[in-house]
Image: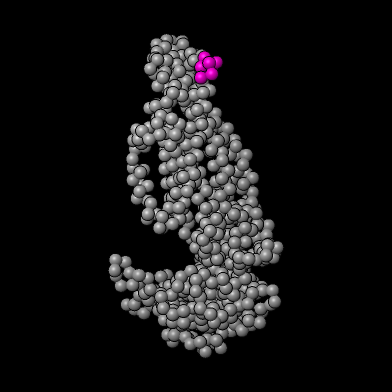
Amino acid sequence: MSTSVETPSPKNSNATDTANDDAALQPRVAGPLRRGVGAKRAVLGAIVPLVLLLLWWLSTSVLGIFSPVQLPSPGSVVEAGIDLAQRGELWTHVGISVQRVLLGFAIGAVLGLTFGSLVGLSKWADALLTPTIGAFRAVPSLAWVPLLILWMKIGEDSKVTLIAIGAFFPIFTTVYMALRHVDKNLVEAGRAFGLSGLKLLTTIQLPAVVPSVFSGLRLALAQAWLFLVAAELIASSMGLGFLLTDSQNNGRTDRLLLAIILLAVIGKITDAILGVVERKAVSRWA
Amino acid sequence: MSLDASTSVRAEETATDTGSGQHQTGTRGKTSQALSVRFANVCRAFPGKNGNEPHVVLKDITLDVVPGEVLAILGPSGSGKSTLLRAASGLDAPTQGTVLIDGTPVNGIDDRCAVAFQEPRLLPWQNIHKNVELGLPQGTPKAEGQERVERLLELVELAEFAHLRPREVSGGMAQRTSLARALARRPGVLLLDEPFGALDALTRLKMQDLLLQVHEAHPTTVLLVTHDVDEALQLADRIVVLGRKPRETAASIAHVFTVPGDRPRNRSDEQLGRMRLTLLSGLGVDTHRH
């Protein structure tokens, strides 16, 4: 117990009751310590992006190694951003893309949770549905694009559907697997204390899978952004994916880079938000 | 010392033979009633793999446990000790024969029993208090349940740790939580499946003393599965040894011993020492080397 990071686990049979006081102190000690580590990590994590930015600036604005068509300078990318923002186009592109991602992600998440729970809890549903869902998962998701466009035309529906498909599978798989692997001992203990059916589900099985559900949601969100760009690259008149193709066609490398940077930043922000919720949930339920 | 080495035990013998009568009288108004347990010709076979013969684990278990008795079930690993306990709890059903608690057969999870497992099996996302609450029978009025949980936490000396999560406490504390959770059911029969087996030696001794205190406070019939001969001698009124005959897969009752003396027993008692040797040799351990 000399290192304060170590927490005694129930399996740690050597921890006798004299360790009680230490055990009670653990959470309080760990809090500020972890925060210090977090700040250090943030500083370390910022080094590489800043160095890349510096190299980018040096190679374009200062040394002029690349022509503006090959690699525009950071300044011109910022200017392109300001230009688009002043014309009001930037917010249209960002807004519609975020809307599509959130909508598709929400639909995919609800369906993934529903089917994942159903198949994970019921042997009958498992036998009935798993082969079919497995086969659908085996289809490379972009293969749906032509069909979706045929069925739903080039509108919001086809894009949101594609994103929902992308978000569905990570959630379905993690929920299904997590429910399959809920500690059998815990479930048996619950049964021994008279829990069954819905009560067993809400007392033991669902809380046990909360952490996995959140890691599934984060995977699904990343997938949603991936599928957004795929959908917008192929057929769209708005959105960050459209900005990418449009800029490529017009030789506007500055806007192209702007779109890529925006995708990285917005994707990272949404992931970070979900990450905060995940950490809260994990500390509550794990 | 009555050394009942005959193969099966009859009800009449054992009921009169035990020194556990004093615990029956301990049943007070507010506590649960200790109940009798009868294993009647209990057999348990598991289906064989790939169409093989079924694997018989237990056979011809006939045994009577009187209310308030502490019965230790001892045997080498794989001798079906836990299977016997699971049959009493209703977590598992015998392939033949029945288990009767207080004269009525066990059918499915039996709310007259409570189990404490070898591992604490606590819900990691709930604190100690909430984990003990899980043991309350469904339909217990809230205020009464809270009061009972608090009293039990006092009993197992965990009151000041009630707000901690299982991973924040030691193994011994987790096991005490598990015991309190079982007692929250007010069980007529308390089933303990090697509850102290995973604890270190010192904690185990403390837990054994605690169990005796708990048994004083809450008179209940206790079936204790253990692989620890000394634990059995320290805690039990009677010790049942399960064993297999040569070239048989199924275990049955090999011996029943009545442990002399009132609890708490002197751990270095000479009579117990002799019984210890008998038990060890009954379990196939060469006693000259121990």
Query: In x, y percent, where is residue A219?
Result: 45, 39
User: Residue A111's spot in the image, x, y percent?
Assistant: 46, 45
Residue at 55% over, 35% down:
A273
Q: Position of residue B267 (x, y in %)?
A: 57, 74
Q: Determine the residue positioned at 58% across, 69% down.
A: B208
Q: Is residue A237 left or right of residue B172?
A: left
As rendered, which of A194 and B121 lies closer to the eye? A194
Q: Is residue B2 magenta?
A: no
Q: Is residue A115 above or below residue B16?
A: above
On screen, B207 above or below B283? above
Asked whether residue B289 appears in the rendered view, the answer is: no
Residue at screen point 52% across, 89% down: B12
| On screen, residue B99 above or below A128 | below
- The answer to which quarter of the image holds residue B68 is bottom right
B157 vs B222, left or right, is right
In front: A240, or A218?
A240
Identify the main secondary structure in magenta: helix
User: Which residue: 62% across, 61% down?
Assistant: B133
What quarter of the picture does the C terminus of chain B occupy? bottom left
State the image coordinates of residue B164 (x, y, percent, origin top left): 63, 53
Q: What range is drawn magenta here?
A: A83-89
Q: Nearer the viewer, residue A241 or B68?
A: A241
Q: Please check the rendered image and state whether residue A85 is part of the magenta-colored stretch, yes or no.
A: yes
